[in-house]
Amino acid sequence: MGLFNKIKKLTKRKKTVKKKAKKVKKQVKKKVVKKPKKTVKKQKKKTAKKKTTKKKAKAPAKKAKKTAKKKIEAPKKFTKSRVEKLLSLKDVKEYLVDLFGIEGFKIIEYLLKAGKEIDEFTLADKVKLQINFVRSLLYKLYEYKLVVFSRERDKKKGWFIYSWQARPERLKELLLNKKDEEIAKLMKKYLDEQQVFYCKECDKMFSYSEAIEHMFFCPYCGSQLEAVEQTKFKQKIKEKIAKLQKEKKAIEAI
C-alpha cells in the first residue's frame, strides 16, 4: 500500500508539473506574439505620421507655386491710346532725336502709330526719305531693340523685302532706365560737397570742375554760371529728384 500511494503522488506531481509547463509555454507564446504586433502597429503609425507630415510640407509649397502663378500676369498689349500717351510725354521726342536724329524720330514715330509691320519701301515713301538712309536708321533702331523685322523673298525679282515693326514696350523700358540714371546722378551731386554752379536759362547744375572746363559759362546756352550755396543747391536737387520720380510714375502708368 505504501508503494502504491507513493506512485500515485508521483503521477500527480508529474501532471501538475506538466500543467505548469503548458501554462508557462502559453504565457511565453502570448508574450512573444504580442510584442511584434505592437511594434508593427507602432511602425505603421510612425510611417503614417511621416506621410502626413510630408503631405503637409508639400501642401504649402504647392499653394505657394499656385499663388506665384496667379501673380505673374502677361504684359498688356500696347493699344493705340497707350502709344499716343507714350509719344505725348515731354522728353520722348528729345530722347529719340538725341539718339537717332530728327529723321530717326520720324521713322520710329510712324511705326509706333502704325502698330503693324511695314515694308521698308513703303516706309521710305511715307517719311519721304531715301531707302538707303531709311535702312541705316532702321539698323540703328534695331541695335536698341526698338524695332523688329521679318523678311520675305520677292518671287519676281529674287531679293528679300524687309518689313519692320516698332516695339513700344522697349521704348517704355528705355525711358524708365533714363529716369533712373538721371535720379542716380542727382543723388550723387546731392552727396557731393563741392562748390556748385547753376544756369538759370537751362535750369542745369554743374560741378566746380565742369564749370572751370567751360570757363564758368553754360555749355548749352552760353549764359554765365552762378555759384550756388550748399543749402539752396541741395533743396533744388531734392525738387528735381521729386519731379523725375513723378515723371517715372507717369511712364510706369502707361
Image (tube, rainbow, N blue to C red):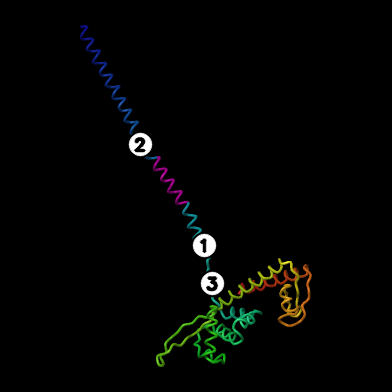
- In the rendered image, the residue lying farthest to the top is 2
How far separated are the C-alphas under marks 3 and 1? 16 Å
Q: CA distance from mark 2 to mark 1?
A: 48 Å
The residue that label 1 is drawn on is 68
Which quarter shows the C terminus? bottom right
Q: Provide the secondary structure element on which disc 3 rests.
A: loop
Label 2 environment density (alpha carbons within 10 Å; few <14, some 14–19, many ≥20): few
Instruction: Answer few, some or many: residues within 10 Å of disc 1's Cα (few below 14, many 20 plus, some between 14 and 19).
Output: few
- Identified at 28% across, 25% down, the residue is 22
Main SS type for the magenta part?
helix
In the rendered structure, find residue 36 and report the number of the disc placed on it. 2
222 sits to left or right of 80: right
Residue 237 appears left or right of 54: right
At label 1, the amino acid type is: Ala
What stretch of residues is rendered in magenta?
Answer: 42-56
Mark 2 and mark 3: Cα distance apart in space: 63 Å
Determine the residue positioned at 28% across, 19% down: 17
Which SS class for mark 1?
helix
Residue 75: numbered disc: 3
Q: In the image, is residue 231 above or below residue 160?
A: above
Instruction: Say which residue appears at 33% left-offset and 34% top-offset.
Output: 33
The image position of residue 44, as x and y in percent, is 39, 43
| Amino acid on which the number 2 mark rests in the picture | Pro
Which is more N-terminal, label 3 or label 2? 2
Where is residue 31 shown, x and y percent of the image?
A: 35, 31
The three-letter code of the residue at mark 3 reads Pro
